[in-house]
Image: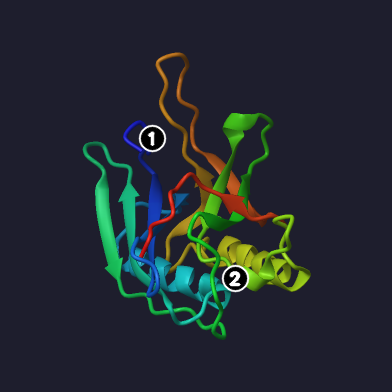
Amino acid sequence: MADLSIPVGYGLWQMYLQHVGLQHTAVVTLGFHVSTPPYTQANNNAALTAWQASLNPLWDAEVSFSRLVALVGNDGPLLRYESLNGGVGSRSTVTVAPPNVTYLLRKTSAFAGRRFRGRMYLPYVNNVGIQQTGALQSTELTILVARATALNANLTVTGTINVDSLALLHASSPLSATPVPTACTLSADDFVATQRRRLDRQ
């Protein structure tokens, strides 16, 4: 993330999630555009509430929204805001798949090309919601689609959260000019994703 460009007027959320049965912390990242600078601590507190409200039906009470960190573009060093204890999931008890298996939300924009699309990985997949092929069962997919819709709506509130759009933040490169962050929306993928993580032996 050291080479990720966060210009003035934009920010990056880092949502920290924990599961009581797993030792590691999962971090979900998402860029945003500030509606009317400055972005404040109160805005970040409201954003944590919105993250939790959007995603808690996906997970049971073993999953906690431990903290939300926002890194916000500034004329000098990035500004940092941290909000703690966003509560736990509200779903009935589920058994989760191994931690390298995740739900997948796609970040899409109005532009073509690999640089103008991205992915967001959500951990703690309901194990019984996955078919042998890796496709989500229809009920599970319906839940994930609703959560993506909720994130798009709940995180782009110009009043309390002070954000008017989600954004793809681009990495700087010596080979070309860094594009301005691109407005994007989230959509649910009907297959799970896997990440390169070794499974820990408890």
Q: Quadrant of residue 109?
A: top right
190 up-or-down from 55: above or below: above
Quadrant occupied by the C terminus: bottom left
Crowding near the residue tagged with mark 2, few <14, some 14–19, many ≥20 C-alpha atoms within 10 Å: many
Which residue is nearer to you in this view: 156 or 17? 17
Q: From the image, tell me which residue sits under label 1.
A: 4
Expressed as whole percent of the image width and height from the top left, the position of residue 137 reads: 74, 67
- Left or right of 175: which side holds 150? right
Q: From the image, tell me which residue sits under label 2.
A: 126
Q: Is residue 38 visible?
A: no
Name of the residue lying farthest toward the right: 138
Identify the amino acid type marked 2.
Asn
The span from disc 2 to disc 1 (Cα, nearest Å) is: 32 Å
Q: Quadrant of residue 41?
A: bottom left
Crowding near the residue tagged with mark 1, few <14, some 14–19, many ≥20 C-alpha atoms within 10 Å: few
Expressed as whole percent of the image width and height from the top left, the position of residue 104 reads: 60, 54
Name of the residue lying farthest toward the bottom: 92
Q: Is residue 90 visible?
A: yes
Expressed as whole percent of the image width and height from the top left, the position of residue 29 reads: 44, 52
| Of pointers 2 and 1, the one earlier in the residue sequence | 1
Which residue is nearer to you in this view: 15 or 5? 15
Identify the amino acid type marked 1.
Leu
